[in-house]
Image: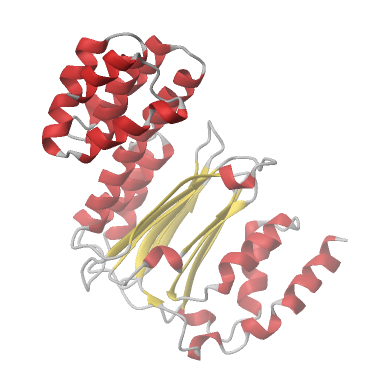
Amino acid sequence: MKNIYVLILCFAFSFEAISQLNRPNDPLTHTYSIVARDAETGEMAVAVQSHWFSVGTAVSWGEAGVGVVATQSFTNKSFGLRGLAMLKAGLSPQEALDSLLNNDDGKAFRQVAILDSKGRVATHTGAKCIDEAGHANGDNFSVQANMMLNDTVVPEMEKAWKKFSDLPLAERMVKVLEAAQTQGGDIRGKQSAALLVVKAEATDEPWNDRLLDLRVDDHESPVQELNRLVKVYRAYEHMNQGDYFVEKGQMQEAMNEYNAAMEMFPKNLEMQYWTAITLANDGKIEKATEMLQKIYKQDANWRELTKRLPKVGLLEVEDRELQKLLK
């Protein structure tokens, strides 16, 4: 039954698999990347950097409970969706990769890595990928690169993956990209980066199955910017948890979460503002007023927002208290 389904898949994608090398819309994303799985959580991820605009729209693909794919060099973008479909149909990463390459006239120019939800991997570096090119893989990971400044990039990426095993998956992936860049990275320089993290298992809420989807499309230091965005993401995890506690009426727990976010980004007005509003809702008007006055001085629009909150029940204070908060 599995083989029949695979044949159907191959037929469905057959027209897209022909003459991929010469299609003008396929990006030449020479780059370095990693596909990986967290052995403890089961989460899977793809991280990539390239001297090419918006690399995340071409190289990185993933689906919760299924796997992740990185397709690069002379990129065949169809490998992303087709590879995931084959994993979902029951093929191993190696079987999926073999099927993709068997139907591709440009396979010598391709670099592809596929990882499934069991942590199995398969990687291909075509003979005509531009030097320095290569890959290294093992249980739960594969690192691959082409058109690198030198041949130390891939070994350093593998070393970083193993070294930072104590980090959460997203931060660990960034460390691998940073390691590649310390060795010179892409011979052309830097332009864009991306990080995609999906859940270990699919849920009945697929809109929540992508845990992290960050892209730096055009930046002079894309990996550095990606690292900053991951930190912002972590801060907003605290903000979201704080909002949850507010809904439950657990104000002290909400304050703990908001304070954690503010400690990470003390200059972020959004985080300061909602902390102040939570204080006000908890009856701490003096402290809230003190915080709000500092915010208003930086941007008066926050005062206008405060006026609008009572109408929708997000600020529940007496009129005299509201006036104090607005002064």
Above or below for 136 versus 127: above
Residue located at (23% from left, 40% from top) = 301
Where does the image place residue 189, in percent across and percent down from the top left?
A: 20, 69
Describe residue 267's horizontal placement relative to residue 235 as left or right.
left
Give the farthest residue toward the front.
319
**Residue 66 seen in render:** yes
How has the structure been colored for display?
secondary structure
Q: Is residue 300 above or below residue 114?
A: above
Instruction: Please state which of residues 173 and 145 is positioned toward the viewer in this rendering.
Output: 173
- Quadrant (top left/top right/bottom left/bottom right) for the C terminus: top left
Q: What percent of the width, then of the height, locates residue 299?
A: 16, 39
Seen as rendered, the residue at the extreme right is 1
Q: Please give the name of the residue rendered at 82% of the width and 66% of the height, measured from the top-left corner.
A: 5
Task: Name the quadrant of the N terminus.
Answer: bottom right
Residue 52 position within the rendered picture, expressed as x and y whole percent measured from the top left: 31, 72
Res. 79 image quadrant: bottom right
Depth check, front residue: 157 or 255: 255
The structure residue drawn at horizontal position 36% and vertical position 20%, both measured from the top left corner, is 257
Q: Is residue 96 left or right of residue 162?
A: right
Q: Examine the rendering and report whether any part of residue 125 can be seen.
A: no
Residue 148: percent from left, percent from top: 28, 69
